[in-house]
Amino acid sequence: MRGVYSRVATALLRSAPRRPEWRLVASFALVILTGAFLLMLPAASTNGEWTPLRPAFFTAMSAGCVTGLSVVDVSTHFSRFGQIVIMLLMQIGGLGLMTFGTFVLVLAGRRLSMRDEALMLESLGAAEDGFSVRRLLKRTIYFSLIFETIGAGLLFCRFMARGFEWPKAAYHGVFHAVSGFCNAGLALYKDNLVGFQNDPVIVLTIASLFILGGIGFPVFYDLTSVALRRRERGHRHVLNLHSRVVFFMTASLIVLGTLLFLLSDWKHALRDLPVGDKITGAIFQATTPRTAGFNVVPMDSISDAGNALTMLLMAIGGAPGSTAGGIKVTSVFVMLLCMVGFLRGRQATVYRGRTITQATVRAAIATVMLCLLTIFTVYGILLAIEPSQPGTSRAAQLLYETISAFCTVGLSLDLTPTLQPLSQWVVALAMFVGRLGPVTLALTIARKPIADTIRYPEEPLSVA
């Protein structure tokens, strides 16, 4: 096994220097393989035996891709050592390998090439003028440490109040703070967070962590930059368009999602809870699909309408440059804005006195279509692999599983452990592609962009 791992690692490292995109893919794959090997060790399991390759690899992929799907029970199968490995994978996957690697280079005083800087900024959702790589990376690490430390402290105090001994309370607080902020969705309890559905402190603390993690580091960078700047020549600095759109979409989806979940599951998943806990549970279940993966109500108790709402929110995801996955709220916003402009007969895509560039519109359309194409391709493969069961909702469950995996959410209708072995490998690959992003993978294998040196005559094409 060690020989196979060594050959794979060597092959990845040899292929990495070709292009920066390959270095990202190869490094991420190497981390996943290393995590899988560590999780296979007898020390990583509670029974002291070797864990088979498939469950170890699937768990490492899920943790590294901050997804949360699992074919084994993390709380009972893995030992403290195995859980710490999982926590480290979540931290690395949440902040991004490129963030960690470039941050180390920056601290060491190394200069980055223009290509590496552009790729770094693009991976963090900050590919525009005015961003400093050094400041952005430092603030990324600082924000992560601050939010996770505060979250871990609050959870530690609450676990202590619930009767946990302080070592267990501290460990559980740190693990769930990392899992929450990184939008991983893995918990140390067999029922995830269902046992804490009547504890608003724990529920709202974890919800706040994954909401903050899903907003994106460029937004926090913009917030601190605006706060630190003073008025210059009578002009007051304001948040840039990206930050305003992220805040608008995040708030809108939380409010709308909460209301819709209350309507769909007031008499279903929330029926046995007091009114206050119904509202808290609805807020949590409306925000966790984007893309945290925790749950405070049993997944099999959610109504069909609630599951449909969950799949839509899972597909939308969080903001660019965040720990969340999905299509991204900014791409969805641009698509909606483009649609409204088309219905109104506008030629340009405009929002609050700003014209969205055509390059941004094309990127949003390409991102949405590529994500949908990948989702339905994986879904078709799973349908072909899994045995058909007439009279059941397995097809709908497979679609739910596919969206959850590709959008790195982690919610499941208890289907993951029952999938065929080949289907589990397909789901693991979907998590990998979803975390790196279909656009990144497309750039990885694409040729050098062709400059438009020749303009051809235009001709209309009927599309409606």
Image: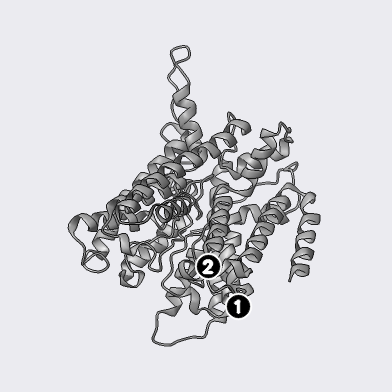
Q: Quadrant of residue 236?
A: top left
- Kind of residue indicated by mark 1: Leu
Of helix, strand and loop, which one carries label 2? loop
Task: Give the mark nearer the N terminus: 1 vs 2.
Answer: 2
- Pointer 2: residues within 10 angstroms few (<14), some, or many (20+)? many
Residue 240 at what x, y percent from top left?
47, 32
Residue 139 at what x, y percent from top left?
54, 34
Looking at the image, which residue is at 75% across and 68% down?
Answer: 2
Residue 46 at what x, y percent from top left?
52, 70
Residue 188 is labelled as none
Q: Residue furthest bottom?
A: 390
Residue 150 at what x, y percent from top left?
41, 41
Which one is in front, 17 or 201?
A: 201
From this view, report whether residue 227 is shown above or below residue 250. above
Residue 422 is labelled as 1
Q: Quadrant of the N terminus?
A: bottom right
Which one is in front, 226 or 186?
A: 186
Q: Which residue is mark 2?
A: 78
**In the figure, is residue 223 to the left or right of 286?**
right
